[in-house]
Amino acid sequence: MTEIPEHLLKRSKERREAAAGGASSGTAETAPAVVSATSAVPQTVASASAAPPPPPPDPSYVVAAKSRKKIPFWAMATLSLLPLWAMLYLISLSPEEKVIEGPMAKGAEIYGSCAGCHGAAGQGGAGRVLSGGEVMKTFPKIEDMLNFVYTGSQAFVSAELPYYGDPNREGGAHAPLSYNGNPMPMQGEKAGGGLTEYEILGVVCHTRYVLSGADRTSEEWLEEYETWCSPESEIFAALQGGSTSFDTIDKDFTMLPKPPTFVGSEARAATK
Ligand code: HEC
């Protein structure tokens, strides 16, 4: 049985006495306080005596559940790896990485090997600036740029060519080794580099239309873009398939609306 705690009994006694005393002094002002004080007493007592009986003892199956060994400490650590497992599982479900197609996509991939010298955005560094229209000024014709990137600048020095690209370039023609004396390394396989011709076409397209920012929809560049750099470029496909090369490209594509001129795999002066 619940017993009314000692301090409650004491308090209630005090209140009762206070109420009795207040009533005898009996001013109009203190009267409401007295009323509330007296009415509080039974409440306290009532709530104390109406406390619920203690809960019945747990049935045996609850006792069993409570006394059973808890989840082992390592379970949480193991479970916390579940999302990781789920992720790996999902990754293994997703389809194979898409095959990169077209010159622009190929070029973006290849440009990683140029970025160390030319900057990720072509802003320049150990190598010349390629962004902001600069390469379009040096190489108004894509054939000349393909040739230069294929051979690199040392080949131009060996061939005693005073310039690469357009000799009438806005801002002055570019002589080989004129940029802090650093050479542009050869890229094409026959010149001793590591890139195939379609890879060179790809990276040149990326440089012209992404880094340098030539407008592929403009009257000036639309035709070049369609012929060389669009995903439908027959030249890119033929280079990839091996049915043409930089040395024969001008003869292999005479049927195009704007046939390519000679590219070549050795250093040469820019075509007019
Ligand atoms: C080791 C550093 C280095 C790497 C790597 C490099 N280049 Fe260069 N590049 C240069 C230098 C230096 C020049 C200036 C050459 C000169 O003055 O003879 C240059 C010049 C050029 C030019 C001529 C720009 C102009 O307007 O005169 C182009 C285009 C170019 N590089 C493209 C590329 C591409 C594309 C790649 C990657 C396939 C590449 N470069 C990788 C150092 C580099």
Image: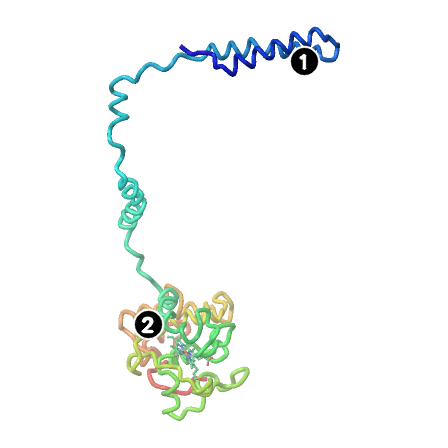
Q: How far apart, in angstroms, are the residues tagged by discs 2 and 1?
A: 99 Å
Which residue occupies the foreground of this view, 106 or 41?
41
Crowd tier of the residue under label 2, counting other residues whose Cα lies within 10 Å: few below 14, some 14–19, many 20 or above: many
Residue under numbered circle 1: 33
Q: Secondary structure at mark 1?
A: helix
Which residue is farthest bottom?
A: 160
Residue under numbered circle 2: 198
Which residue occupies the foreground of this view, 270 or 155?
155
Label ID, residue 216: none
User: Which quadrant is the N terminus positioned in?
Assistant: top left
- Quadrant of res 193: bottom left
Counting from the top left corner in percent of width and height, residue 135 is at 47, 76
Residue at screen point 52% across, 10% down: 45
Q: Confirm or reject: label 1 Cβ below 8 Å from ligand 1.
A: no
- Quadrant of res 146: bottom left
Crowd tier of the residue under label 1, counting other residues whose Cα lies within 10 Å: few below 14, some 14–19, many 20 or above: few
Counting from the top left corner in percent of width and height, residue 213 is at 49, 69
Which residue occupies the foreground of this view, 135 or 63?
63
Q: Amino acid at mark 1?
A: Ala
Q: Amino acid at mark 2?
A: Tyr
Which residue is farthest right?
A: 28
Q: Secondary structure at mark 2?
A: helix
Residue at screen point 51% across, 67% down: 218
Of labels 2 and 1, earlier in sequence is 1
Residue 7 higher or lower than 142, as above or below? above
Marks 2/1 in contact by CB < 8 Å: the verdict is: no
| Left or right: 226 as drawn, with respect to 14 | left
